[in-house]
Image (tube, grey):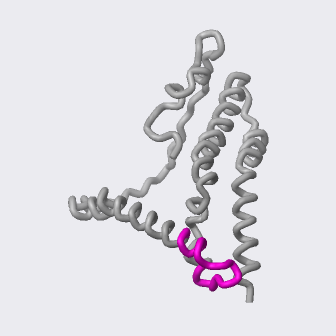
């Protein structure tokens, strides 16, 4: 849930530009125009149509309640059932909610996500100060800081495969 509705600089003063560390970068701007254009006229959506395009606050609250129920049911099942007695459907019921089945993972995930985004933003800031743009470096930083989630997903996939495999 990063960056929420707060600005990064508000949370991390060291990331704010200062007159001594941030040079003014003048970029050449240009625009191109096509020789032909296509215009499509659509009717204005009614207020009911607009309202139905997004989940309402009540619907989102219902989803949250259902998620809590699903997690509690999965935890009860995991506590009460030996792993060798799990049926294929029992594992399918856990897919997508693995994060919520471990309190430690649940607590650490938001901070890890935040740190992941922050590491990329800091690298972009460093590159901006040196007038460089190194996509390979950003890709490597992203890969390294998200390796934990890749490993976790691979472990879950392997567990499901071994357990459900005919």
**Percent x, y of residue 91:** 62, 77
Does residue 119 lie above or below 130 as drawn? below
Q: Which residue is at 66% across, 42% downward?
A: 116
Quarter of the view holding residue 85: bottom right
Magenta stretch? 75-90
Please tell me which residue lies in front, 63 or 42.
63
The quarter of the image holding the C terminus is: bottom right
**Percent x, y of residue 98:** 60, 64
On whether residue 80 falls in the magenta region, the answer is: yes
Quarter of the view holding residue 129: top right
Does residue 21 lie above or below 110 as drawn? above
**Percent x, y of residue 66:** 41, 67
On whether residue 29 falls in the magenta region, the answer is: no
State the count of labels: 0
**Percent x, y of residue 138:** 73, 40
Q: Which residue is at 61% across, 79% downward?
A: 81
Q: Which residue is at 46% across, 34% downward?
A: 6
Q: Residue furthest left?
A: 47
Q: Residue furthest bottom?
A: 166
Does residue 121 lie above or below 85 as drawn? above
Please tell me which residue lies in front, 98 or 82.
82
Left or right placement of residue 163 versus residue 14 in this view: right
Please tell me which residue lies in front, 49 or 121.
121
Q: Which residue is at 64% across, 10% downward?
A: 20
Q: Residue furthest front?
A: 80
Quarter of the view holding residue 60: bottom left
Left or right placement of residue 1 versus residue 56 in this view: right
Q: Tell me the chief SS of the magenta region.
A: helix
């Amino acid at each position: 849930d990063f960056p929420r509705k707060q600005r990064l600089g508000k949370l991390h003063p060291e990331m704010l530009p200062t007159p001594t560390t941030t040079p003014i970068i003048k970029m050449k701007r240009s625009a191109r125009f096509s020789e032909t254009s296509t215009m499509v006229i659509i009717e204005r959506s009614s207020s009911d149509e607009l309202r139905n395009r997004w989940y309402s606050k009540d619907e989102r609250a219902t989803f949250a309640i259902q998620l809590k129920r699903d997690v509690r049911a999965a935890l009860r099942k995991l506590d009460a059932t030996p792993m060798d007695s799990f049926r294929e459907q029992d594992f399918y019921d856990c897919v997508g909610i693995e994060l919520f089945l471990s309190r430690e993972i649940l607590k650490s995930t938001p901070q890890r996500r935040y740190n992941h985004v922050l590491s990329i933003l800091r690298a972009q800031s460093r590159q901006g100060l040196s007038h460089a743009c190194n996509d390979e470096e950003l890709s490597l930083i992203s890969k390294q800081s998200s390796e934990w989630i890749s490993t976790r997903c691979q472990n879950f996939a392997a567990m499901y495969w071994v357990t459900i495999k005919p």
